[in-house]
Image (cartoon, helix red, strand yellow):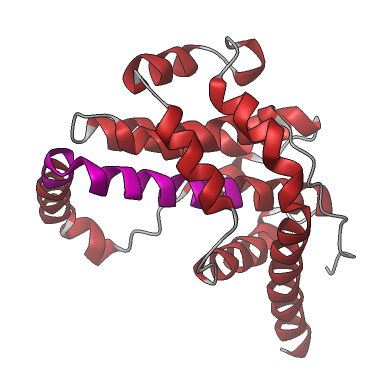
């Protein structure tokens, strides 16, 4: 079933972007694999947090779809090798900290894009059923893959620079929902500059909608 395009909500809302922010900042945790665990925890919390903020529940099977990592059976067999490679990679980046900072900036920007689009998908009705969500998740992946350089990168760099005691901050965020957490410096920085990205976020939403509409045309033609 096709849905009309929703109006993008570009206003800053910490409840929408908090878990995305913490997922991106998890890269800064100086303990290999602990950083991965925190990142995945916050990544998995994103759909539920956005749904609560909009007071619009997402079906459980749709949440599972959004949170999957796209592992094929063959990839699962290679998981131990991948884990060992990831450990070595993260260890090297903890030694060369400037590489970790770059990774955190890129990760933070990517998770903000993901949170914005999940919010858009939710309000557009694209997550109301698993059948719709499968097309939406594909359009989400295509849109994120097409993001090369983003104006959000400058803001992400500023947020990463001001973040300290990251493990303590993230552990506190794990125990509390964003709306109940202590004031975060990231929140203030983002709130002060987020309005500058309105036009860009509208473009991102339009790209996603084009991918989603294209998938609907394919379905109707079959």
Residue 33: name its quadrant.
top left
Q: Which residues are magenta?
A: 92-114
Q: Residue furthest bottom?
A: 221
Magenta span dominant secondary structure:
helix
Q: Position of residue 219 (x, y in %)?
A: 72, 81
Q: Position of residue 172 (x, y in %)?
A: 44, 12
Quarter of the image for the N terminus: give it. bottom right
Quarter of the image for the C terminus: give it. bottom right
Does any portion of residue 127 appear in the rendered image? no
Q: Judge by depth and name the residue closer to the eye, 220 or 45.
A: 45
| Above-or-below relation of 203 to 108 | below
On whether residue 107 falls in the magenta region, the answer is: yes
| Above-or-below relation of 7 to 3 | above
Q: Judge by depth and name the residue closer to the eye, 135 or 194.
A: 194
Does any portion of residue 83 appear in the rendered image? yes
Tell me: 85 left or right of 188.
Answer: left
On whether residue 102 falls in the magenta region, the answer is: yes
Residue appearing at x 58%, y 9% in the figure: 182
Q: Judge by depth and name the residue closer to the eye, 96 or 146.
A: 96
Q: Position of residue 93 (x, y in %)?
A: 17, 45
Residue appearing at x 70%, y 71% in the figure: 207
Q: Judge by depth and name the residue closer to the eye, 100 or 162.
A: 162
């Amino acid at each position: 079933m096709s849905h009309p395009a929703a109006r993008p909500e570009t206003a800053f809302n910490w409840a929408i972007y908090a878990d995305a922010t913490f997922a991106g900042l998890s890269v800064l945790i100086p303990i290999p694999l602990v950083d991965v665990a925190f990142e995945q925890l916050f990544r998995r919390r994103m759909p539920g947090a956005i749904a609560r903020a909009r007071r619009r529940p997402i079906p459980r099977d749709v949440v599972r779809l959004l949170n999957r990592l796209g592992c094929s059976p063959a990839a699962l067999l290679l998981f131990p090798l991948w884990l060992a490679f990831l450990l070595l990679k993260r260890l090297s980046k903890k030694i060369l900290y400037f590489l970790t900072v770059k990774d955190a900036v890129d990760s933070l920007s990517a998770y903000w894009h993901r949170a914005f689009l999940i919010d858009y998908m939710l309000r557009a009705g694209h997550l109301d059923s698993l059948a719709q969500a499968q097309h939406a998740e594909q359009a989400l992946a295509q849109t994120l893959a097409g993001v090369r350089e983003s104006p959000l990168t400058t803001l992400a760099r500023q947020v990463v620079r001001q973040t300290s005691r990251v493990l303590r901050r993230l552990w506190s965020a794990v125990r509390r929902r964003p709306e109940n957490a202590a004031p975060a410096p990231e929140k203030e920085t983002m709130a002060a500059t987020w309005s500058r990205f309105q036009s860009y976020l509208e473009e991102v939403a339009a790209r996603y909608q084009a991918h989603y509409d294209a998938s609907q045309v394919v379905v109707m033609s079959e």
